[in-house]
Image (spheres, rainbow, N blue to C red):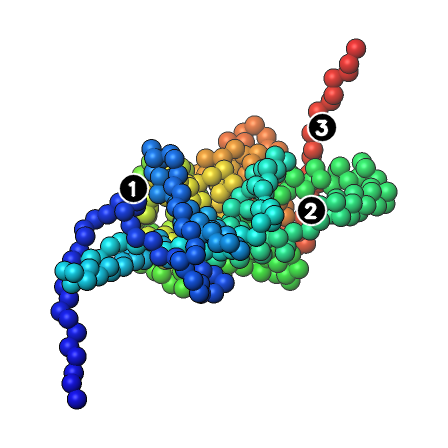
Amino acid sequence: MTTNMAAPCSLVCCGEESDSEKAVIVRFSNGNVKNAEKLDFTMYKNADESNPRKKSKRIMVAESDRLCYVGNNFGAGSLKCNNLCKYYVGVLNRQTMQMEVHSAQLFNMQPVIPGDATETAKPQDTTQTYRDKVDSLIEAFGTNKQKRALSSRRLNQVGSDTLHQAVAKAANTVIDQKGLEALQQEVDETEVQGDLALHLPPCNAGADKPENVYLFDDLLSPVEFGALEQAGSKMAALTSEELKKMRDEAGCLCVVKHLQNMPSVGEARDKVARCAFYLSMLLKLARQRSITRKFGQEEGCPRIIQSKLLRTFTVETFNNGRVQNIVSSSMRSKLAAYALALLLHMNRMTGDLTLLHRDLGITEARMVEVAKSMGLTLIKQARAKAFEAESQDTNKHASLVLPLVKYDQFIERRKRKKMH
């Protein structure tokens, strides 16, 4: 028994090759070719050599007596693996016994039936909207997340014609029942009350006691109230000179008034002191425009209170790529409502509107509007004689009395100019 040893063979790499020098490997999609010698292969390349996208495009054609096969390396019928893999083919030179390794590209040959017209490119629909074009791009090239969002949006869409008909029918029914003037009056009242209604403290209009209408825990939770112990102690220990300085420089007239008249000892004194500190933070916040994360640190404001103020009474905005907390005009109305509710608990359900609007930096009319929206009763001071007017308190006050007062909103209507 003899053993035939294979002849030794060495590999030779041909180095980098251009697209025109690459070997070609063809694969027929409908089976194997029995007689490849009867096929006439022709390769076509794009004539635009300057365009980097077109210069590498190739079309391989294999013709036989019965059928014609076509394959290309671009378009929908090309193999995606050409972009992800590199193919090499070895050619053995039997004389030198060296195998040359050449770069190769793969073509998927598909039969072309004579007379079968290919689909012509449809002209772009110029009536498509920008949204329709974006949706088409998402369907073709979007990620899975984008495609799911597109599918969800289309499922939630309601036919525009049906929706418009239903809205028009409902509007006509309401107009027939109530009348156009009554509806206009309701809309005007809603617009006036809408801004303030969103920024009032939680209200229990059906409470049996005045102190339960605007609960103290909704203004300061037990945890937040406990965190104010140290700050309240410092506030209660202020001297008369320090109170005068606070009134002249900081302008906290409400705070100074309550600190001067606070109880001498007991839990009531501690509660007033803690509430006075929290009220001073509200007033300071209302007088500023942009708020930083260091707000209240100089006064010893607890971290939990600082976070509550930024979260509840400021809005986030972007400026020069940075997030900033600002106090908008609507947030000032919210600060006024919460500060007034806190004053009610500090002074037996009565608050001084004149001092509060000065401390907040808003107009007196705006302060009265906030008090009316909260359902408070405005206290009118009786007229006094000339010699008693100097000693009498002329400030406006508001008191919480059950049931809450529902005020009629005054709506100013502009007269239309007559056309001559």
Image depth: mark 3 or mark 2 in front = 3
Q: Amino acid at mark 2?
A: Lys
The residue closer to the viewer here, 219 or 313, is 313
Q: Identify the residue under disc 2.
A: 406
Q: Is residue 302 visible?
A: no
Q: Identify the residue under disc 1.
A: 241
* Rendered view: 266 above or below 348: below
The residue closer to the viewer here, 70 or 230, is 70
Q: Amino acid at mark 1?
A: Glu
Residue shown at the point (47%, 39%) measured from the top left:
328
For numbered disc 1, what is the local secondary structure? Answer: helix
For numbered disc 2, what is the local secondary structure? Answer: loop
Residue shown at the point (44%, 65%) measured from the top left:
34
Please rate how many residues cluster around mark 2, counting C-alpha atoms within 10 Å: few if below 14, some from 14 to 19, many from 20: few
Q: Identify the residue under disc 3.
A: 413
Image depth: mark 3 or mark 1 in front = 3
Residue lying farthest to the bottom in this orientation: 1
Please rate how many residues cluster around mark 1, counting C-alpha atoms within 10 Å: few if below 14, some from 14 to 19, many from 20: few
Q: Earlier in the sequence, mark 3 or mark 2?
A: 2
Left-right relation of 11 to 385 = left
Q: Earlier in the sequence, mark 2 or mark 1?
A: 1
